[in-house]
Image: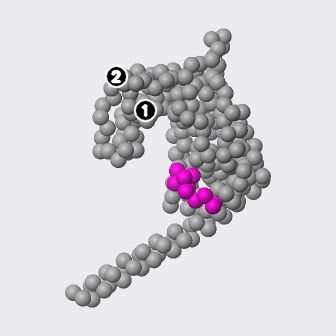
Amino acid sequence: MISEKVLADKFNHIWASVFPMLDATFMRTFNIKNAQRIRVGKRGLVPPVHRATNVERYDLVAELAFEGACDHFVGTVGGRARALVRYAKMHQQVIADEVTTAESEEASKLLSVYEKFFKAVIGKAGFKFHPFIPGTSVLDNMVADICTDMMLIEVKAVSRNLSSTDIKQMLCYLIAGQASGRYHWRQFCFFNPRRAIYYMGDSDWLISALSGKSTLDVVTQFKCALAEVEYPILSLHSINRSTALTAHETKSAGT
């Protein structure tokens, strides 16, 4: 089984065959035409959160803000502890160092952007954090960021534009959710609390614009493409297992 991050980063032949229009030109146009600033009432535009010079663990700050938003909007507790655990896993550490004052302050600024985004864009629609998405074929089970019944929201707390890898991960979630029958997200959204912007659109439009086909056709084609990847992976596992058994039998015979 492979994760959506590995699938998005590798296996270029799958993406080229199923989504031939996902190229540099599409990404350049998408970033220019679809980025929207967050507006709140008469106060106008929400300002971006610039990186503080005395903060180095920006990814930890992003996790603190995300888990803090989960606590704030859903009512969970222990967001800081969850963020530290997630950060430690990302960096293959047993435990992360405690949060500094500067990191906590910057996370609070990002959390403020979350609050404005939910108020201005999402409204009072019921939503959940960490939605579980069943995998399909060789694609492993996944956990996305946030969703409502009608929208999937991925958080990218970065200073850069969206990349094709970001789009590919979103496509994995949308297609696997549709294939499972559990989700039917009509809209997608990328939310960037760092830059105080978001990208929102129709899921069917995104899939059609990149593939030239309907969502239903793409789900079928994508699953078939994954099945072609699954066979050599399973064959490799069988070969490795057979080799290990042969080595064990040879060793046993020699003792």
What's the distance in space between the residues labelled 1 and 2, CA to CA? Answer: 13 Å
- Region rendered in magenta: 5-14
Residue plotted at (67% across, 27% down) = 36
> Which residue is labeled 2 in the image?
101
- The residue lying at 52 percent from left, 28 percent from top is 194
Type of residue at label 1? Tyr
Query: Tag 1: Cα neighbours inside 10 Å, few (<14), some, or many (≥20)?
Result: some
Residue pushed farthest bottom?
A: 253
66 drawn magenta: no
- Mark 1 or 2, closer to the camera: 1
Residue 73 percent location from the top left of the image: 52, 27
- Element marked by disc 1: helix
The residue indicated by pointer 1 is 58
Q: Residues within 10 Å of mark 2 (few under 14, many from 20)?
A: few
At numbered mark 2, what does the secondary structure look like: helix, strand or loop? helix
Looking at the image, is 164 positioned above or below residue 61? below
Provide residue 91's location: percent of width, then percent of height: 37, 44
Q: The residue under label 2 is which amino acid type?
A: Thr
Viewer-proximal residue, 218 or 22? 22
Residue at left offset 35%, top offset 42%: 88
**In the picture provided, is 135 more to the left or to the right than 188?**
left
Main secondary-structure element of the magenta-colored stretch: helix
Q: Quadrant of the C terminus?
A: bottom left
Asked if 116 appears above or below 17 in the picture, the reply is above
Image spot of residue 190 (x, y percent): 61, 36
Query: Residue 99, located in which quarter of the rendered image?
Result: top left
From this viewpoint, is residue 85 visible? yes
Residue 78 in view here:
no
